Amino acid sequence: YVVSQFLMALPGLFVISALSSIIVYFMTGFHSGFDRFIFFLLALFLSLVTAEAFMSVMAALVPHYIIGMALGAGVFGMFMLMEGFFVQPADIKPWWIWAYYIGFHTYSFRAFMVNEFDGLVFDGNPQCGVAAPAVSG
């Protein structure tokens, strides 16, 4: 039952990923390369598959679906806080660093950042009159 449920969810997750990627990727002006778009789509799809699998495990562990949704939302919220966007990995306290490493949000976020910023060079803002060091991705 579990395997068939998982396999039947894949096409729907792919449709959600594809539609979201088409809208978000081109609307925000991300890199125009087709390979980067495919990587973005694949990273989003795998992230959704992981979230679906995690919630399936959560549903099997708790006696009522409301409890499962609440616990899953809490765990996802914790993972999102520790993924490296809100709190940089160097600033995460030692007793919370495990959430950075086990949360799949961390790896999805890093994949999206590498996909977008790899190969770019930022020279600062010359209009400010302040020389900034060049930063490259």
Image (spheres, helix red, strand yellow):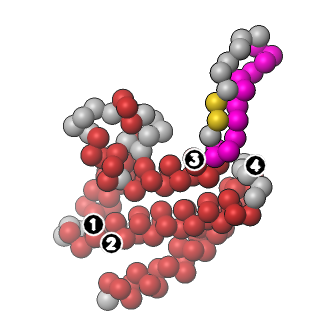
Q: Does 123 sit above or below residue 61?
A: above
Residue hosting label 2:
56
Amino acid beneath label 3: Met
Label 2 residue SS: helix
In primary-sequence order, the first of circles 3 and 4 is 4
Q: Report the residue marked by disc 1.
A: 58
For label 3, count other residues whose C-alpha is less than 10 Å away and answer few (under 14), some (14-19) or many (20+).
few
- Magenta residue check for 97: no
Q: Is residue 31 left or right of residue 82?
A: right
Residue at the location (33% across, 33% down)? 92
Q: Position of residue 91 (x, y in %)?
A: 36, 29
Q: Quadrant of the N terminus?
A: bottom left
Q: Which residues are magenta?
A: 117-128
Give the number of the disc on residue 113.
3
Q: Are marks 1 and 2 in contact (CB under 8 Å)?
A: yes
Q: Position of residue 8 (x, y in %)?
A: 46, 85
Residue at (67, 18) in percent of width and height: 132
Q: Which residue is mark 4?
A: 29
For the residues labelled 3 and 2, the Cα–Cα distance comes to 28 Å
